[in-house]
Image (spheres, grey):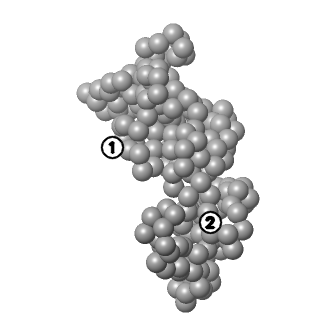
């Protein structure tokens, strides 16, 4: 028989499933990109395993503007309205104020949505740039990924990290996952948005 070219995650902790898990796709990182990848693959029936060091989302402020192209991608998987429902009214965030310091004198104020380019973009796309914090976006994506995972045979392993991987001689990759160390995060690479290395 032909070698199995799918990745496998090998348990190394009692909390992991007793048998090695197998999937054609391993997603390293559960930020917006990793979670969106899991959602998309599950919608197409492609099993995947997502490893994310954090057990829950990080509540600290991070990215907050979601560009038009990203909203188009969320629209394709039916999440655009859920994401938009988290945004404050545009009148509260359309003006960008430039100051010398947090409480310092204002240097300039620019309404980025009052330009001809904004009008052209609105006509070109059914989706719209929006203002939602990354923790809010991740919550929407995490819920959708968890909803779709069982039917696709996907797994979301929060609180786990890649400890080691080997490229197998016949193709494929063997990955050893372990419980992430307490407070881990911000290291590693893959689908974890801007925090990857």
Residue 186 position, x and y percent, is 41, 39
Residue 90 position, x and y percent, is 68, 71
Q: Residue at x 54, y 44 (%)?
A: 60
| Residue 185 picture quarter | top left
Residue 145 is left or right of residue 173, and the answer is right
Q: Measure the C-alpha gap from mark 2 to mark 1.
A: 27 Å
Q: Secondary structure at mark 1?
A: loop
Which is more toward the observer, 54 or 122? Answer: 54
Q: Residue at x 66, y 32 (%)?
A: 150
- Rendered-image quadrant of the N terminus: top left
Residue at mark 2: 130
Residue 14 is left or right of residue 152, and the answer is left
Residue at mark 1: 197
Q: Residue at x 51, y 10 (%)?
A: 14
Task: Please tell me whether residue 117 is drawn above or below residue 177 in the rendered image.
Answer: below
Which is more toward the observer, 28 or 184? Answer: 184
Q: Is residue 3 visible?
A: no
Chain-order first, disc 2 or disc 1: 2
Residue farthest toward the bottom in the current orientation of the protein:
116
Q: Secondary structure at mark 2?
A: strand
Which is more toward the observer, 186 or 99? Answer: 99
Number of marks drawn: 2
Residue 67 position, x and y percent, is 54, 66
Q: Is residue 146 visible?
A: yes
Mark 1 residue crowding within 10 angstroms, few (<14) / some (14–19) / many (20+)? few
| Residue 41 picture quarter | top right
Residue farthest toward the front in the current orientation of the protein:
104
């Amino acid at each position: 028989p032909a070698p199995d070219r799918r990745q496998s995650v090998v348990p190394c902790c009692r909390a992991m499933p007793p048998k090695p898990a197998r999937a054609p796709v391993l997603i390293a990182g559960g930020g917006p990109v990793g979670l969106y990848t899991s959602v998309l693959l599950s919608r197409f029936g492609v099993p995947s395993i997502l490893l994310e060091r954090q057990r829950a989302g990080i509540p600290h402020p991070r990215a907050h503007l979601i560009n038009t192209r990203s909203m188009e991608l969320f629209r394709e998987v039916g999440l655009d309205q859920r994401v938009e429902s988290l945004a404050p009214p545009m009148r509260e965030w359309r003006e960008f104020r430039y100051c010398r310091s947090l409480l310092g004198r204002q240097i300039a104020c620019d309404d980025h949505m009052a330009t001809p380019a904004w009008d052209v973009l609105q006509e070109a796309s059914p989706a719209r740039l929006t203002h939602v914090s990354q923790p809010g976006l991740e919550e929407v994506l995490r819920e959708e990924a968890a909803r779709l995972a069982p039917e696709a045979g996907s797994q979301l392993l929060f609180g786990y990290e890649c400890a080691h991987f080997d490229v197998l001689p016949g193709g494929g990759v063997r990955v050893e996952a372990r419980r992430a160390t307490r407070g881990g995060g911000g290291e590693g690479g893959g689908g974890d948005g801007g925090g990857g290395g």
